[in-house]
Image: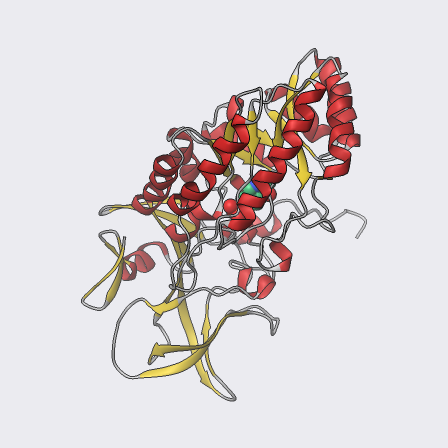
């Protein structure tokens, strides 16, 4: 999907130089082939599991439509993501509404749409009950359990440690299911956890599944019939080019444990997974143009994309591989690639060896498909950039770049000023 021809980086059969000329920079460019390859890897590794795509990783409708048409469901974390999922064509039976702080109106929208809920608190349970009763609906739920497991990832993306804001601790799970069982308009059907993101080992997933299995057995005794055990998402990707575990590796270790856990239950639950990053992460590059090269304390390469478009390096200290896209080879130097934002934290890549860079060169930031555009902002008065999809030798604009009009579209100046 990503290759060099005469030194130029190609995405499938299209030159990044041509993409930059045609669509301008900065621009997010996605390979449809790579996306389908990632989807296929999950289908092959987990043929019997329900796979819900975590929409927050990348909410582009064209990509979501491809994912939905492959039979995936959707994990949504807000009413906006629910709206996007329904529009993209995900079936409501396969949408799970997650979130630790859903507003009453978000819950109402989910209930009217008839999706399933992952319930994060007893307050939320009661809200769902009362709205479902008013709407005359029966809503299937899971509780999000906090399994207190260390996913061995960045602290800001570890979500299943006991001090985390997500989910109910094991000790409160039984009471929660008991309450739900007594409710007329709420049916507990599943159990859920999500322990974190960019996880590069299988053992945290196994521990989480065993923990859910233990709780599942206890809640079955209360009378819950489980349709699904959802162990969330979080499988990491190979940002550093050093190799990472694949869906196949995870399946090899996880599925035997799932068999063991479910054979110990009376019900016959399905395994659910919620991959985000591992579906879209490596499908996309952020193409950005060099505005200036400056040799001071460091060799700075100043490009036209910053943390307004890709916040992961600034927010989590994340590593993204960076390459010069318009040529290859020759003399190399050490560069720090920085964006145009008025913050010293606007560093995309520190101290990287690159072929000698000049103003006008194109830089590609790799593996930018997950938590890239979806976390972008208009900070510093910068309209968001375009997104382009490549398939073979075809390209399509899948999101128009924003304009200055978008900076002011919702602003109002009161007439008394
Ligand atoms: C973010 C999130 C996911 C996806 O995580 P990835 O690391 O992108 O796979 C899945 N489930 C829930 C509940 C999430 O919040």
Query: What residue is drawn where x is 37% and y is 35%?
Result: 43
Judge by depth and name the residue closer to the eye, 176 or 217: 217
Residue 179 as seen in the image, left or right of residue 156: right
Total residue callouts:
0
Q: Residue at x 80, y 31 (%)?
A: 123
Furthest toward the top, the residue is 136
Q: Residue at x 29, y 44 (%)?
A: 33
Q: Position of residue 242 (x, y in %)?
A: 38, 64
Q: Is residue 376 left or right of residue 109?
A: left
Identify the image's colour scheme: rainbow, by chain, secondary structure or one colour: secondary structure
Say if 363 sits above or below 298 in the image: above
State left or right for residue 168 relative to residue 321: right
Q: Is residue 249 visible?
A: yes
Residue located at (55% from left, 40% from top): 232
Above or below 184: residue 123: below
Ligand 1 shown in quarter: top right
Q: Where is residue 210 shown, x and y percent of the image?
A: 58, 39
Q: Is residue 375 above or below residue 298?
A: above
Quadrant location of residue 152?
A: bottom right
Observer-nearest of 337 and 167 = 167
- x%, y% of residue 251? 42, 41
Q: Position of residue 362 (x, y in %)?
A: 35, 68
> Is 219 in front, or is 415?
219
In the rendered image, the vertical position of residue 377 relative to residue 191, given as above or below: below
């Amino acid at each position: 999907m990503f290759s060099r021809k005469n030194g130029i980086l190609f995405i499938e059969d299209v030159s990044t130089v041509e993409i930059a000329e045609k669509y301008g920079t900065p621009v997010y460019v996605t390979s449809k082939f790579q996306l389908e390859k990632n989807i296929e890897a999950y289908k092959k590794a987990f043929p019997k599991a329900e796979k819900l795509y975590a929409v927050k990783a990348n909410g582009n409708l064209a990509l979501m439509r491809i994912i939905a048409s492959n039979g995936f469901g959707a994990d949504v974390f807000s009413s906006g993501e629910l709206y996007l999922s329904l529009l993209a064509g995900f079936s409501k039976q396969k949408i799970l509404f997650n979130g630790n702080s859903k507003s009453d109106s978000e819950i109402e929208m989910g209930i009217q749409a008839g999706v399933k809920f992952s319930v994060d608190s007893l307050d939320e349970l009661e809200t769902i009950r009362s709205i479902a009763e008013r709407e005359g609906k029966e809503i299937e739920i899971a509780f999000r359990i906090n399994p207190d497991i260390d996913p061995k990832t960045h602290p800001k993306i570890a979500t299943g440690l006991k001090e985390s804001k997500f989910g109910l601790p094991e000790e409160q799970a039984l009471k929660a299911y008991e309450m739900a069982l007594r409710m007329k308009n709420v049916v507990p059907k599943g159990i859920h956890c999500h322990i974190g993101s960019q996880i590069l080992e299988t053992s945290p997933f196994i521990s989480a599944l065993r923990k859910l299995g233990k709780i599942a057995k206890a809640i079955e005794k209360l009378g819950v019939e489980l349709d699904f055990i959802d162990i969330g998402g979080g499988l990491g990707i190979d940002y550093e080019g050093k190799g990472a575990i694949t869906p196949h590796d995870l399946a090899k270790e996880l599925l035997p444990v799932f068999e063991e856990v479910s054979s110990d239950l009376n019900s016959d639950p399905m395994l659910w997974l919620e991959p985000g990053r591992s579906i879209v992460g490596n499908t996309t590059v952020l193409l950005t143009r060099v505005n200036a090269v400056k040799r001071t304390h460091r060799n700075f390469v100043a490009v036209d994309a910053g943390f307004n478009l890709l916040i992961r390096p600034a927010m989590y200290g994340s590593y993204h591989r960076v390459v010069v896209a318009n040529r290859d080879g020759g003399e190399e130097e050490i560069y720090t690639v920085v964006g145009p934002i008025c913050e010293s934290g606007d560093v995309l890549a520190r101290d990287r060896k690159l072929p000698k860079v000049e103003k006008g060169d194109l830089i590609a930031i790799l593996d930018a498909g997950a938590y890239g555009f979806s976390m972008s902002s208009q900070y510093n008065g910068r309209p968001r950039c375009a997104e382009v999809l490549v398939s073979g030798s075809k390209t399509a604009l899948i999101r128009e770049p924003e304009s200055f009009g978008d900076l002011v579209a919702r602003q109002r100046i009161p007439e008394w000023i």
